[in-house]
Amino acid sequence: QSAVNVPRDFEGCSTLRKYFGQLHYLQSRIPMGAEQEAAVPIAWTEIFSGKTVTHEDIKYEQACILYNLGALHSMLGAMDKRVSEECAAGAFTYLRDHFPHSYSVDMSHQILNLNINLMLGQAQECLLEKSMLDNRKSFLVARISAQVVDYYKEACRALENSETASLLGKIQKDWKKLVQMKIYYFAAVAHLHMGKQAEEQQKFGERVIYFQSALDKLNEAIKLAKGQPETVQEALRFTMDVIGGKYNSAKKDNDFIYHEAVPALDTLQSVKGAPLVKALPVNPTDPAVTGPDIFAKLVPMAAHEASSLYSEEKAKLLRDVMAKIEAKNEVLDQFMDSMQLDPETVDNLDMYSHIPPILMEKCAALSVRPDTVKNLVQSMQVLSGVFTDVEASLKEIRDLLEEDEAQERKLQELLGKVPPPQGSPPPPSPGLAEVSKECSKYMEVHEKASFTNTELHKAMNLHIGNLRLLSGPLEQVRAALPSPTLTEDDKQVLQNLKRILGKVQEMRDQRMSLEQQLREMIQKDDITTSLVTTDRSEMKKLFEEQLKKYDQIKVYLEQNLAAQENVLKALTDANVKYAAVRKALAEVEHKWNTTVQTLVASYEAYEDLMKKSQEGKDFYTDLEGKAARLLEKARAACQAAEANRQQILEK
């Protein structure tokens, strides 16, 4: 009811558009087309004949609404702006291109062509007026005016059609006369501005012929304008003053000043029209125009089936793209594995600028125990002292035994006894034999302990320097750690390699991001609503149109995949240059790790050294006591043996 009794304003246009859209939604669900089960009779009155025309076809209702939309826009355009004329042209164009022309004579192809070109011609007129008010270049104004002529010529051809003439009757003659008048008038305006351009280019002969042609065409327009309103007559008189004045002035100047040959008009290049207006497209399913689909909950089975087919198309698209991505990723992974390049540690230069945490921990531990080295040295000195005392006692015992043995040998010689074989000592006295036995036992223990003691001193000498270093200033510790020496060229090679590795990662990240975007787009892409309102014959076309939304992201992915070859080639070249630097850095890193491990080992050896040092002191202190007692015993036994020998000699 609102669409039939529509108000003559833009709200009326909105109502017609909404109704037209909802009819489109309805006819895609309910079989209301010609000869379909739910078709109902629809009646409208022809605009020119006044006859009532009835069709059992919902498309006829749509066609009539669309015609009225175009008509209403043309009425508003007469009062308002160019855009209304373009909207009217859009409505008539959609009606011409999408609906049968047999519904009624006022919807014939010729009538609709007439309407379209009348609308576009008037819209172009508005643009022409604006371009003249804005003082645009003469040649542009001429082309805009020539296009007005082209639109009205098309309209005139439609008016001259016999069917159109019989349908329109007297109106046809009036319209044709008015359109022809406009054709001549705007042709005159076009040539007026071509003459002005010739004037700007100082082509004074051309200027004369263009102004003369403009004057001739304007005179034809004036002849055809008889019976037109006074406003039209006034406009024609004003234009005659302008063109007449221009022509007279140009002819006079050329006759008396320039004397240029005036060329024939047909020898000059014709003015090609510049179409700057267009029929605004009608989209029957634009929700911004139609409002919500009031039949949205009615989804036919065919739409569900079509949705499944579309889902398979999306899946196929994803499979194709993923096959390309996975192939490239496999090549990339194999390449990077063979390179053995980790972007995070490709140069390791940062690690040389600070002391590693494990070493800092040891330095911190020693800083709260400042006497560590001193205690170790003192402990080893005490051990050395006890060791020396034991060695001295055992040597003295050995010397006493040897002296006693020598004295015993002399006694035997004096007594005339056969001396024992060379090297075999005479049998000692029972007391000395016991001393000798114990001395040998202590000497054996001492020799074994002496080896351990020597090893302990070596270990201490090995670690003491490292412990002193760890106890000292941190700067000295840092200075003791090896660091690489790189030339400027080496640094440049490193920077280049890191930059290209960054490009590889950037390429990976972008690829993953685009893949994720594609998956999300496909997941969210539901066109069931559009499928409901699309004719089955248009389904394939709709699929193609809908799948175009993925073209841009596919282009980005293709570019990403295509870039891989160049990136890997650049990485190969950079890696070749990096080989020598890599070797040098690996050697320095090995030395650095070894030094750190050695320093840590020295710290961890400290407690063990102190423990073994204490054990050595305890052992030698005990041995020293035993050796001292044995020494006293040896002295006493030797004295007893000497006294015994003296008694023998006296006898």
Image (cartoon, grey):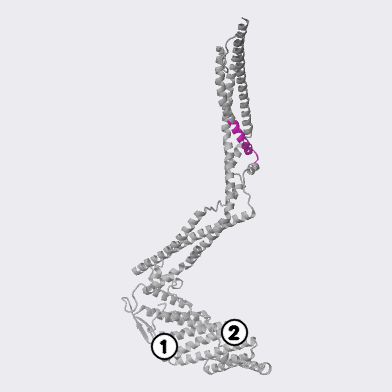
Q: Residues within 10 Å of mark 2 (few under 14, many from 20)?
A: some
Question: Which comes before the other along the chain, label 1 or label 2?
Answer: 1
Quarter of the C terminus within the rendering:
top right
Quarter of the N terminus within the rendering:
bottom left
Tell me if I can see residue 326 in this picture. yes
Mark 2 secondary-structure assignment? helix
State the image coordinates of residue 50 (x, y, percent, origin top left).
39, 87
Q: Is residue 444 magenta?
A: no
Residue placed most toward the observer, 1 or 509: 509
> Considering only vertical position in the picture, is 512 above or below 247?
above
Mark 1 secondary-structure assignment? loop
- Residue 160, quarter of picture: bottom left
Q: Residues within 10 Å of mark 1 (few under 14, many from 20)?
A: few
Q: Is residue 461 magenta?
A: yes
> Considering only vertical position in the picture, is 236 above or below 496?
below
What residue sits 46% from the left and 89% below the top?
A: 157
What residue sits 50% from the left and 89% below the top?
A: 179
Residue placed most toward the observer, 409 or 530: 409
Range covered by the magenta-colored residues = 455-473
> Considering only vertical position in the picture, is 184 above or below 619?
below
Drawn side of residue 172 relative to residue 361, left or right: left
Residue picked out by circle 1: 48
Q: Which mark is residue 139?
A: 2
The rendered magenta stretch, by its main secondary structure, is classed as: helix
